[in-house]
Image: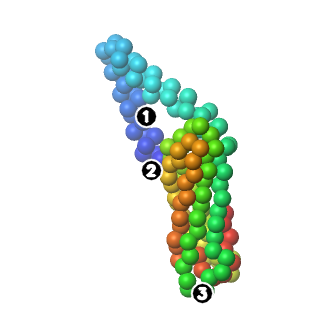
Amino acid sequence: MKIVRKFVWLLLTLGLLALTVQTASPIALGLAACMVLLPLICLPVNLYAAKKLKLTVRLPVNLRKGEGGTAELTVQNPTWLPICQIACRVCLENQLNGETQVVNVSGGIWPKGRRTMKISQKIILSELIMVK
């Protein structure tokens, strides 16, 4: 999905640049400059925010065999910047039988706020669980 998004962005940028060259419009030039410069400006801001985020994981300690559980991921944003989208890829591994499952969770976080994301999966069984 990320490749499609980047490909669409590239096509839009190239289309705006072609429109700028063809029409010599200052509005098209401004839009093309925004499409090129905005990701470059956002990169250091995103890297700064990523360094400051705090993640805590809560897993159930004791469960019976065959019983499902709920894991909670809490992300705290102590910065003054809002985080529009945060994605966590959690790999749950049952160490006794080797069963693994990858779960993707995502959401946004307001400045100086926290977001709790819950994972309810059947793989969280009564045995040893390792989170990667």
Q: Nearer the viewer, residue 101 or 117?
A: 117
Alpha-carbon distance for marks 3 and 1?
50 Å
Residue at image position (36%, 20%) is: 28
Q: Is residue 78 above or below residue 31?
A: below
Taking the spot 67% from the left edge, 76% from the top edge, the residue there is: 61
* Numbered disc in front, either 3 or 1: 3
Cβ–Cβ below 8 Å for labels 3 and 2?
no
Q: Which residue is mark 1?
A: 10
Residue on which the image places disc 3: 65
The answer to which of marks 1 and 2 sits earlier in the sequence is: 2
Q: Is residue 37 above or below residue 10?
A: above
> Is mark 3 in CB contact (under 8 Å) with mark 1?
no
Which amino acid is tagged 3?
Lys
Left or right: residue 74 versus residue 30 is right
Label number found at residue 1: 2
Q: What's the residue at 35%, 17% (across, down)?
A: 27
Residue sitting farthest toward the front: 112
The crowd level at tag 3 (other Cα within 10 Å; few <14, some 14-19, many 20+) is few
Image height of 107 relative to 24, above or below: below
**Viewer-side residue, 39 vs 14:** 39
Q: Nearer the viewer, residue 120 or 19?
A: 120
